[in-house]
Amino acid sequence: MNVTRLIADFLRALFQSLWQTPAGNPVENLSRVQIVNQLLQECGLRLIESDPKGNARPLTDAEIKILQETTLSLGPVWYAPFRSRPLNLWVDRNPGGGHYGNHWLRIGDPGKDPTVLYRIFIHEGTHASNEYRQWMYEQEWCTKPGLDWKRLGEAWMHPRQQGTVMQPGSWETLPVDSRDVSVAPGEDLAEMVRYFVHSVKNEREFLWPLDRNKPPMMLWDTSPTRFVFVRDVFLRLPSDHPWYKTLAPDQEMRARVNLGLG
Ligand SMILES: [Zn+2]
């Protein structure tokens, strides 16, 4: 264990002790102003609730609560890079999708379904966290065995390229179809983080096209390396985190070998 890791672990424990009390979840008692302030000061997330053109709208209390809970759960390894240069997040009065670029994260109006905001936030926020960390997935990780990306000239290649059905082979991928992640490493990462969250939280309704009769962790049979990467590298969750789940011992072992985690 090196010194940087020790300091990081100490800071994480410190931040957790600041917002957790033995009584349970203290964030429930914070006012809207306190939550907005916490998101900016602790998490580096700046909410932009109006703009001169009138496209940005104020967030509802429910939306702000989702952002707070999700950000704190994703943890400081995910959001701490935003503190030195805040991530500007806004909800567009116009519906449709989301986008991240150059420190700005747009979420199209989710309408009456706040889970849209939740899902887009994890996906686009992961693009942001990856970029704030100098594209760590592309630079350091995605070419490792089990993640299986290769760079050919300017193009990123994956054995399962976009639009092709799952084939058996000595490579791993997420079992997705229309939202195919094999178009680029960044999309692969954004979706694997989102799927990690939904699977460990048992949110089967968000795991289409996974068979809803199967347990959500079945999603990772085709890429245990992605699961362990998200848990132990990209989010680096502490083992007492409510999202810390484990796969079968042989899957865990294979993933750790692939990632060189010893
Ligand atoms: Zn994306």
Image (spheres, grey):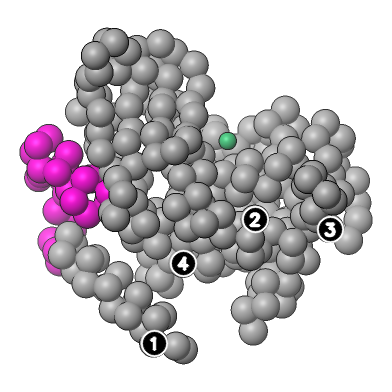
- What is the x, y in percent for residue 155? 79, 44
Residue where numbered disc 2 is placed: 138
Q: Residue at x 62, y 45 (%)?
A: 186
The answer to whether mark 2 is within 8 Å of ligand 1 is no
Badge 4 or badge 3: first in the primary sequence: 3
Q: Is residue 27 left or right of residue 153?
A: left
Q: Which residue is mark 4?
A: 236
Numbered range of the magenta stretch = 21-44
Instruction: Give the quadrant of residue 172.
Output: bottom right
**Up/down of 48 relative to 126, above or below:** above
250 over 188 or under it: above or below = below
Q: CA distance from mark 3 to mark 2?
A: 18 Å
Asked whether the residues under the numbered discs 3 and 2 touch, taking CB atoms below 8 Å apart as contact, a structural biologist would say no
Q: Nearer the viewer, mark 1 or mark 3?
A: 1
In terms of depth relative to the viewer, which is nearer, 230 or 220? 230
Badge 3 element: loop
Task: State the residue position of label 1.
Answer: 3
| Mark before the other along the chain sequence, 3 or 2 | 2
Q: Is residue 37 above or below residue 259?
A: above
- Disc 2 crowd, CA 10 A, few/some/many (<14, 14-19, 20+): some
Badge 4 amino acid: Arg
Q: Dot 3 corresponds to which residue? A: 171
* Residues marked 1 and 2 touching at CB (< 8 Å): no
Using the rendered image of the protein, determine whether residue 79 is visible from the camera's viewpoint.
yes
Task: Kindly identify the amino acid type of the residue bearing the numbered disc 2.
Answer: Glu
**Local secondary structure at mark 4:** loop
**Tag 3: amino acid:** Trp
Counting the numbered discs, the total is 4
Q: What whole-number distance in Å separates the C-alpha atoms at marks 1 and 4? A: 16 Å
Mark 1 and mark 4 lie on one chain; the one further toward the N terminus is 1
